[in-house]
């Protein structure tokens, strides 16, 4: 889609302002060069043959190879390195020098970047919903909205975790990268409105998962700079830790001469396409641990020959171990949102406040995409409120027709309508299940993913309840300081949201009148997908792959439910938790962790 000179000028101003913001924030505090703080991070092409196994002609083996330098992989590798040699392989680059990752103000740009070097890898589920997976050290913590909140005590108990160790592992993360948010007036209106409509009590600022309304933590500091799971690597033992970036693991290597297959190494490509092999030692305690996330982990198991036999044979993949559950029963928490026009400019804020209801839904909010009155009938690329949710969609999909249709739908709205934000409603525990299957044998390509949103009737009922809560919220007294939303206005907002929330699902004429249809037609993702390597089906309670020696999976692919309102806190906790458990099992509880 061609942009005229005004569009180029506006986009240039937008990017310039982001750059100036970078200059301001980068001067705050002590920001050492990342190479000085993380000397163990290097490009995969620098991995020499001397890092291979003696059994295969090299000189070095590792006690642990962690595949995936993401939300779980970074704390896990840092913890294991305290006592053992660890190789951490990450397919993406580093977040530290990437301004689109580092700055809150650039949050949406990374999601809109579909280039091969982007920190996020775009994909579309077969449901027609746009989605993203991380491709950068730090994983999802490098591209998400930053909200930090723990899992409930019920969740911890149900997972069978050691509550004492859980309560030691969360603070280990929090002390290093989590902050109390700078609470904006818009978020305060959301907080007060939620309490007024009955989502009580007001629990204030807390990391805990409590019914009512709360302010959670954030991985953005007061200067708007992101702190990712990659920073947890600084707490590792640099002498024991090797981190390779741009290391794209192709498959796990197995010794199949015994009764059960045994993982022995991994094959990966570097940034130049050259292949390398890394091996773990022959010690019975040495392991390969997969932490590639809910998309990457089942995909890697399948590529390595672990999964449903029929699916593997279709792609001529040799079956190492048959497990019909790999890639199955996947879930994504469906999200629906309503755009709320405000009568004043508001600062950009991502998720800070959440309403935790007893009706199986969570309510959150974001804000800060505002424009001047003169811009109300034109669009400005990624900085445009006319595009709304299109800011997260690849440029080629931002059609002129879509933008013009949105403009037609808002012509009768006041100029103030485009100072605003979004109210988000998310299903807490979806019953609808989907699956992941390989698209081909190329590890760099996305697999084929289906989530079957709202295929279970309970999910649809809960979504309707959630939208009704949002409608009450925008008419609550605290919101009247920002906007005047009567019933007619709220209905108009639903109509606008139908157009603004972009996916590939066909629209229906009664979207705004039928809340069920609104839910189905405007569903989007908040990237909380999980499953595919479930505990009890693919891994045991120690996260060891069932039927395979020296191989574990530790990440969100093992979850039956997404923990808390937002999962990143618990995924980081789990990396630390399992690292400590593994060390204690080898060294005893006297280990100083």
Image (cartoon, grey):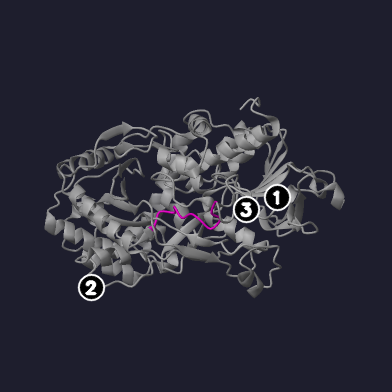
Badge 1: few (under 14), some or many (20 or more) residues near its Cα, within 10 Å? many
Q: Is there CB contact under 8 Å for labels 3 and 2?
A: no
Where does label 3 land, which residue? 91
Helix, strand or loop for disc 1: helix
Q: Which residue is drawn at the image coordinates 43% and 48% (left, top)?
A: 107
Secondary structure character of the magenta stretch overall:
loop
> Residue 477 in the image: x percent, y percent?
14, 42
Total labels drawn: 3
Residue interval drawn in magenta: 525-535
Within 10 angstroms of label 3, few (less than 14), some, or many (20 or more) residues? many
**Looking at the image, can residue 152 be seen?**
no
Left or right of 573 on screen, residue 2: left
Identify residue for label 1.
Answer: 44
| Among numbered discs 1 and 3, the one appearing first in the sequence | 1
Give how far apart the Cα atoms at labels 1 and 3 are: 9 Å
Quadrant assignment, res 180: top left
Quarter occupied by residue 2: bottom left
Label 2's element? loop
The residue beneath circle 2 is 509
Residue 513 x %, y %:
19, 66
Q: Quadrant of the C terminus?
A: top right
Please state which of residues 133 and 198 is positioned toward the viewer in this rendering.
198
* First of labels 3, 2 by sequence position: 3
Left or right relative to 62: residue 578: left
The quarter in which the N terminus is drawn is bottom left
């Amino acid at each position: 889609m061609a942009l005229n000179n005004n569009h180029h000028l506006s986009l240039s101003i937008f990017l310039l302002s982001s750059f100036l913001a970078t200059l301001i924030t980068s001067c705050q505090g002590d920001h050492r060069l990342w190479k000085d703080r993380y000397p163990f991070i290097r490009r995969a092409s620098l991995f020499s043959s001397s890092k291979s196994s003696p059994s295969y002609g090299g000189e070095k083996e590792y006690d642990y190879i962690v595949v995936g330098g993401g939300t779980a992989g970074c704390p896990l590798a840092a913890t294991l390195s305290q006592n053992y040699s660890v190789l951490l392989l990450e397919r993406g680059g580093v977040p530290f020098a990437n301004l689109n990752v580092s700055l809150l103000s650039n949050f949406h740009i990374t999601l809109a970047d579909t280039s091969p070097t982007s920190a996020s890898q775009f994909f579309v589920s077969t449901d027609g919903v746009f989605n993203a997976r991380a491709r950068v050290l730090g994983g999802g913590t490098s591209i998400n909205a930053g909200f930090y909140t723990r899992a409930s005590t019920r969740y911890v108990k149900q997972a069978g975790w050691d509550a004492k160790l859980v309560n030691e592992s969360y603070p280990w993360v929090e002390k290093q990268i989590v902050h109390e948010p700078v609470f904006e007036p818009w978020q305060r209106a959301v907080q007060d409105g939620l309490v007024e409509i009955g989502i009580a009590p007001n629990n204030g600022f807390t990391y805990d998962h409590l019914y009512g309304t709360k302010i959670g933590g954030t991985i953005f500091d007061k200067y708007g700079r992101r702190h990712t799971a990659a920073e947890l690597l600084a707490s590792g033992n640099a002498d024991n830790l090797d981190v390779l970036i741009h290391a794209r693991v192709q498959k796990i290597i197995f010794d199949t001469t015994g009764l059960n297959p045994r993982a022995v190494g991994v094959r990966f490509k570097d940034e130049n396409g050259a292949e390398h092999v890394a091996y773990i030692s022959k010690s019975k305690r040495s392991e390969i641990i997969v932490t590639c996330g809910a998309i990457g982990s089942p995909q890697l198991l399948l590529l390595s020959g672990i999964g449903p036999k029929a699916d593997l044979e279709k792609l001529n993949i040799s079956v190492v171990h048959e497990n019909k559950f790999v890639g199955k029963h996947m879930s994504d928490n469906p999200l629906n949102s309503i755009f709320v026009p405000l009568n004043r400019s508001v600062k950009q804020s991502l998720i800070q406040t959440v309403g935790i209801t007893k009706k199986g839904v969570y309510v959150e909010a974001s804000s800060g995409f505002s424009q001047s009155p003169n811009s109300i009938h034109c669009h400005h690329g990624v900085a445009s409120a006319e595009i709304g949710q299109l800011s997260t969609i690849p440029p080629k999909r931002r059609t002129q027709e879509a933008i013009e249709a949105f403009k037609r739908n808002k012509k009768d709205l006041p100029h103030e309508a485009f100072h605003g934000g979004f109210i988000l409603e998310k299903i807490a525990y979806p019953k609808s299940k989907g699956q992941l299957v390989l698209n081909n044998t190329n590890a760099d390509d996305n697999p084929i993913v289906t989530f079957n949103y709202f295929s279970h009737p309970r999910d649809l009922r809960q979504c309707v309840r959630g939208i009704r809560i949002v409608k009450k919220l925008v008419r609550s007294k605290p919101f009247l300081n920002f906007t005047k939303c009567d019933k007619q206005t709220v209905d108009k907002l639903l109509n606008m949201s139908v157009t603004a929330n972009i996916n590939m699902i066909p629209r229906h004429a009664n979207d705004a009148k039928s809340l069920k249809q609104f839910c189905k037609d405007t569903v989007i993702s908040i990237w909380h997908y999980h499953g595919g390597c479930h505990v009890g089906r693919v891994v045991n309670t120690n996260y060891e792959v069932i039927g395979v020696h020296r191989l574990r999976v530790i990440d969100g692919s093992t979850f039956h439910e997404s923990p808390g309102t937002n999962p990143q806190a618990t995924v980081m906790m789990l990396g630390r938790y399992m690292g400590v458990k593994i060390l204690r099992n080898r060294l005893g509880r006297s280990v100083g962790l």
